Amino acid sequence: MRESEAPESRPYHHGDLRRALVEAACRLLEKEGAQALSLRAVAREAGVSPAAPYHHFKDKSELLDAVAHEGWEKLDLAFQAARDAHTSPPDRVRELGVAYVCFASQHPDLYRVMYDCSRDKADMPAHVLENEESAYRRVREVLVSAGADPSDEIGLELAAIACWCAAHGLAEMTSFKQFEPLKEALGGEEAFLRGVLAHVGVFAKGL
Amino acid sequence: MRESEAPESRPYHHGDLRRALVEAACRLLEKEGAQALSLRAVAREAGVSPAAPYHHFKDKSELLDAVAHEGWEKLDLAFQAARDAHTSPPDRVRELGVAYVCFASQHPDLYRVMYDCSRDKADMPAHVLENEESAYRRVREVLVSAGADPSDEIGLELAAIACWCAAHGLAEMTSFKQFEPLKEALGGEEAFLRGVLAHVGVFAKGL
DNA sequence: TTCTTATTTGAACACCGCTAAGATAGCGCG
DNA sequence: CGCGCTATCTTAGCGGTGTTCAAATAAGAA
């Protein structure tokens, strides 16, 4: 009756159905898009009955939260790569912005789930903003090392928020058809992203 | 059988059901929120059977498109008011940005419908970007009158896009709980919005 | 009038989120 | 070992959704 999983610590019937469901949801998200991500379809993809997920998530939204969490972790990997590829703080923060928008451009459906979850709760995931190692903190640090007044707490906050908002806005708009001629004129999407971000706060200081 | 409409040009059974449906949808959007905006609920609100809308819209998405169109027109009214309230170009473009985000903050569900429609088609409404009197054109004009090089077509475009992206991002994020303390410290949401926008491209030049 | 066409309805299909009741399987404890 | 307990999963079902289609209806044309 078991399919093909390593028999490591399978405490109950399925093994780790919770994780299997999140993985099935991510698979479905890439394969069919965000609109096809119904709870029943996820259960089907995981080979389980439509009611099974309710023993691991109280809600559909709670399953989506788990998917979004996965997404934020993947984004953090992209962040680390961007940071490690550069040494100067201004370079780093600029590449952070580019990596952010590129991630959204490469995983549009996942990014949509991530932000829809946050918006529905009017609340960003705590580890994204508040953690010591969070992307938000990294932006603030580089702001200071790029010359911002570290004692101006409010100014620092506003500048970091401006960067984040511009990145999010660009992430959602970069796929609009109207921008395609400009992307071609600049020789690709990444050049386009850099060009836009260069007009925003600390991103500009990196140039 | 008729309710209480002026008997002006009622060519068919209901009169102008298409318009009545869009108005019912807007009413429902303000009253119940975006998640309650089902086609059946709209038909119910308009006092008509669930299948009736299909003779005026091929799809649910086409009805939402009409609602979004209504929204863009309302936003344009806010734009005109913001423009007429100031004379200097830098003031005007700054107030344009503030008006944009304030509109989204005051009609969050309508704004959501507007942008979801655009994103699903990866296409902004033509009149928003391409028209001579469009908000996008107005931003570009003020960019020039604020000192941008009018012969640098690409630079102009990039700056205008940066403004738009920042406004959209801020519009979607301003309701996040994490920003509330900062809003209070600044004495209100509008001051917060101005503070953030001041870090973005041409918006900053107005200060 | 009758004919034609646009409009609206009612019934139906497939799918959705979610719930409740029963079947099943792993675990602790005697 | 065997018994019961509890977590897990299934089956069945509720109300709601988008959508389609044949029938009914009303407006305008001939």
Image (cartoon, coloured by chain):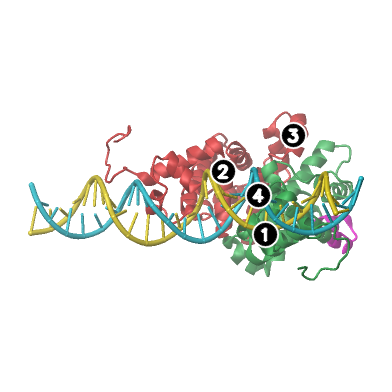
Chain colours: A red, B green, C yellow, D cyan
- Judge depth for marks 4 and 1 and give the one in front: 1
Q: CA distance from mark 2 to mark 3?
A: 23 Å
Whole-angstrom CA distance, mark 2 to mark 1, is 24 Å
Crowd class of label 3 (few under 14; some 14 to 19; many from 20; radius 10 Å): some
Q: Are marks 4 and 2 on the same chain?
A: yes
Residue placed under numbered mark 3 in the picture: A180
- Residue under circle 2? A34
Residues indicated by labels 4 and 3 sit on the same polypeptide chain = yes
Question: Which label sits on residue A163?
Answer: 4
The circle drawn on residue B42 is: 1
Whether callout 3 and callout 1 share a subunit is answered: no
Does the magenta stretch mainly form a helix, a strand or a loop? helix
Residue A5 vs D30, above or below: the answer is above
Whether discs 2 and 3 lie on one chain: the answer is: yes
B103 and B45: which is toward the camera: B45
Task: Tell which tag, 2 or 1, sits nearer the viewer.
Answer: 1
Which amino acid type corresponds to the residue marked 1 in the rendered image? Val
